[in-house]
Image (cartoon, rainbow, N blue to C red):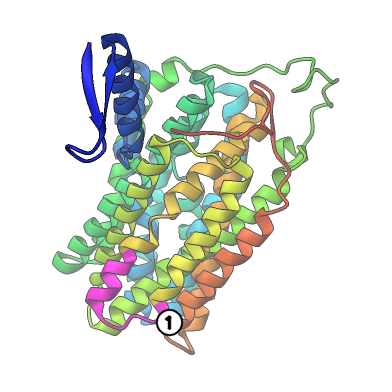
Amino acid sequence: MFHVELGNRGNGGMFHVEQPQLSALLHRSIQTWRATIRPPVISLTRYSTLLAQPALRSAILASMLGRLPIGITGLAILMLAQDTSGSFGHGGAVAACYVAGLATVGPMFGRLIDRYGPRTALLACAFAFPASLAALVVALTSSAPLWMAFTAAATSGACFPPITVCMRTFFKQQLKEDLLLTTAYSLESVVIELIFILGPVIVAVFVALASPAAAVLFAAACGCAGTLMFQRSRALAHWRIAERSPAGPLGEPRAKASLFGPLADAGFLPLLAVIVCYACAFGLVEIGTMAYALESGSAAFAGVLLGIMSIGSAAGGLVYGSRSWRLPLTRQFPLMLAIMGLGIAPLALLASPWMFSLWCLAAGVAMAPALIMQSMLVAKSARPEHSTEAFTWSSTGLLAGVGLGLTIGGALLEYTQSPAVFMAAAALSLAAAALALPLVKPRNPERGNAASPVSPS
């Protein structure tokens, strides 16, 4: 038995407490104390659980080199075209042609991969991509007609190896739990952001020590070698070609095969419109950052600023994928797009390079979570036999929006400076948030109705 005094010393009352009662009291106090301690902002537990699976780990590692051109090619083409012509409008138009090639041919590759597997498409792209980039360098550095540069840029975009959509489809095939799938897409977004961090730095090094043309040729070499390496990964060894099942997601009769593939599914086109809208803001931010760097006196500074922004984005993706969230996914998406717009707007007001660099870190935080939510919504909306094509359509929307943003930004910069471009990017992000509000909650053929909240952690 223990004697416990409550109140001030000498003035409090004495109580007799049995040992079991004291143990229970202490246990309750400890539990209350532990509940008041906030968990770490980023928990790597689920990431380590995901990477413990050998097939997933080896596939991610094998995809890295082949996807490095994602962070290099667009910026290098933009800088090469601007350097050879002296015009932002010209540079933005050539970069937009590259993105247009990516956007238009991607869904056709996706449908072929859904039906026949990815090996043939990847092998063709491994050689066509570097050849078309070499032709683009020749066209831009010689006195070739402008249409030749546009054609070579569009062809190189059309032949970009579809490693990323293959990875996203592979994740959907392998992971049946929403939490692990969200963690996988979060890790995927972090990988992409790391590529976007490293890519602009590589471009900046090539611009400082050699030329933008050398950066384009380096991207061509990485695309060829990395795609051939990815072909030997476990992702392709475990690939499954989905067959059409006789019933729909909730047991209703399934509609006949459509020429439009996933575009015929309810809710997919509105989602695609949102993707195009906020991706346009990405393109505006990219060309606006390049313009700011030139206004500050150094073109190579653009790569550093975009790399800083990608660091913030990668951190945001890690946080999002490591924690649980109460809001349903369809409510998280517009909220994150609104936060992204509010984060971009101050870039128009900051003249100091130091302050601008610091805010680039903050402005990037919402970007990766928005992309993760987009991937989850696509995965939940697409039928198994349309998985890769659905992801290529979402990539098409993303790339088309980026290309549109580059074109709009280039046109704006002919008459104004970078602050107007950043304000346009912020406005489009907020418009995308408004468009995302009425999105129909997607249904998943493998997981049932997705109306329940998704809690990534």
93 over 12 or under it: above or below: below
> Which residue sits furthest bottom?
415
431 over 18 or under it: above or below: below
Q: Is residue 397 left or right of residue 320?
A: right
Q: Quadrant of the N terminus?
A: top left
One can see residue 301 in this view: yes
The structure residue drawn at horizontal position 33% and vertical position 52%, both measured from the top left corner, is 196
Q: Is residue 260 left or right of residue 184?
A: right
Our reading of the magenta stretch's main secondary structure is helix
In this view, the residue in front, 183 or 199, is: 183
What range of the chain is rendered magenta?
A: 348-360
Looking at the rendering, which quadrant does residue 27 occupy? top left
The structure residue drawn at horizontal position 84% and vertical position 26%, both measured from the top left corner, is 256
188 over 172 or under it: above or below: below
Q: Quadrant of the C terminus?
A: top left
Asked if the magenta segment contains residue 149, the reply would be no
Asked if the magenta segment contains residue 353, the reply would be yes
Residue 106 at x, y percent in the picture: 56, 43
Q: Amino acid at mark 1?
A: Pro
One can see residue 306 in this view: no
In this view, the residue in front, 225 or 388, is: 388
Q: Secondary structure at mark 1?
A: helix
Q: Which residue is mark 1?
A: 419
Residue 206 at x, y percent in the picture: 20, 61
Question: How many numbered marks have been drawn onto this rendered protein structure?
Answer: 1
In this view, the residue in front, 404 or 454, is: 454
